[in-house]
Image: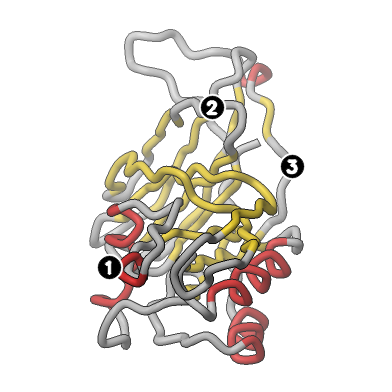
Amino acid sequence: MLTWFSVLALLFQAPSTPPQPATEAVVRLAPETVIVVELFTSQGCPLCPAANELLADFGAREDVIALAWGVNYWDAYGWADQFAMPEFADRQKAYVQAGEAMRVYTPHFVINGAPEQLRFDTERVTRALEDSAPVPAARISETQDGAYSLSLEGERTTPAEIWLVAYTPGVEERQIESGRNAGLRMTHFNMVRSVEKLADWTGGDAAYQLPGLSDDLDAVVLVQDGPGGRILTAARLP
């Protein structure tokens, strides 16, 4: 169990690299706490267009980190989802295995990693967001050469997973030519394009350098209490 957790703006240096002066680290201003809202969605799912728009509404809040994961469960109905990747479905399956749901489904909202069976209803999902307890916002440090790093400090009895999630920021539209949503110009928001597990954090002082990204993608760091577990802390990269 996490008994004390904080995120410090520290610059990661390999043991062979002399430490740089602290004045070279520029820390991004961010909310003190955040709420992570994940949506598992599909271009072939009839209810998903409304869920995508609801996620965009949530994402307009400064304290909300909104992420949409494309999954391929509806591909058998005549349209292959353009964003789906196997690792995105694996993430949803981890939530299902840890929580109340009997199987994967869409649209599926997950708030702060809590694996409750939160079936789609605008009022129900909105109420769950309003009732959720925010998590501490991670602070990312930046060096003069544009690199970013994350340091963690605290005690753990089980490993926590550190994920880097890259996504296309904002709203984009795609024309759906066939399947259950044939003829619809579908709105998407913050569609995830890749996910990378950086490390398992087992507690104590630890620092992690964050990989670079392409210029057209944004990214967030999620620190999670094991597979399908709760989000412990999170932050957007500048």
Give how far across and how far down residue 17 sits, in percent. Answer: 40, 9
Q: Earlier in the sequence, mark 2 or mark 1?
A: 1
Mark 2–mark 3 contact, CB under 8 Å? no
Q: How many marks?
A: 3
Query: Seen in the image, is 109 located left or right of residue 101?
Result: right
Foreground residue among 45 and 200: 45
The answer to whether residue 104 is seen in the rendering is: yes
Can you say whether 17 is above or below 108 in the image? Answer: above
Viewer-proximal residue among 236 and 103: 103
Q: CA distance from mark 2 to mark 3?
A: 22 Å
Residue with the mark numbered 2: 214
| Quadrant of the image occupied by residue 196 | top left
Residue 114 drawn above or below residue 82: below
Residue shown at 32% from the left, 69% from the top: 73
Indicate the position of residue 68 as horizontal and vertical percent values: 52, 60
Kindly identify the amino acid type of the residue bearing the numbered disc 2.
Answer: Ser
Where disc 3 sits, the SS reads: loop
Assess disc 1: are there few (<14), some (14-19) or many (≥20) residues with their C-alpha within 10 Å of its C-alpha: some
Q: Is residue 26 above or below residue 15?
A: below
User: At x 66% / y 73%, what residue is drawn?
Assistant: 54
Secondary structure under tag 2 reads: loop
Whether residue 1 is visible, yes or no, is no
Which of the marked residues, 2 or 3, is nearer the chain's N terminus? 3
Query: x%, y% of residue 104?
Result: 31, 77
Of residues 128 and 200, the one drawn nearer to the viewer in this rendering: 128
What residue type is disc 3 on?
Answer: Leu
Please name the residue that numbered disc 3 is placed on: 29
Crowd band around label 2 with a 10 angstrom C-alpha radius: few (<14), some (14–19), many (20+): few
Distance of label 2 from label 1 (alpha carbons): 28 Å
Task: From the image, state whether disc 2 or disc 1 is nearer to you.
Answer: 2
The residue to which callout 1 is attached is 94
Kind of residue sitting beneath label 1? Ala
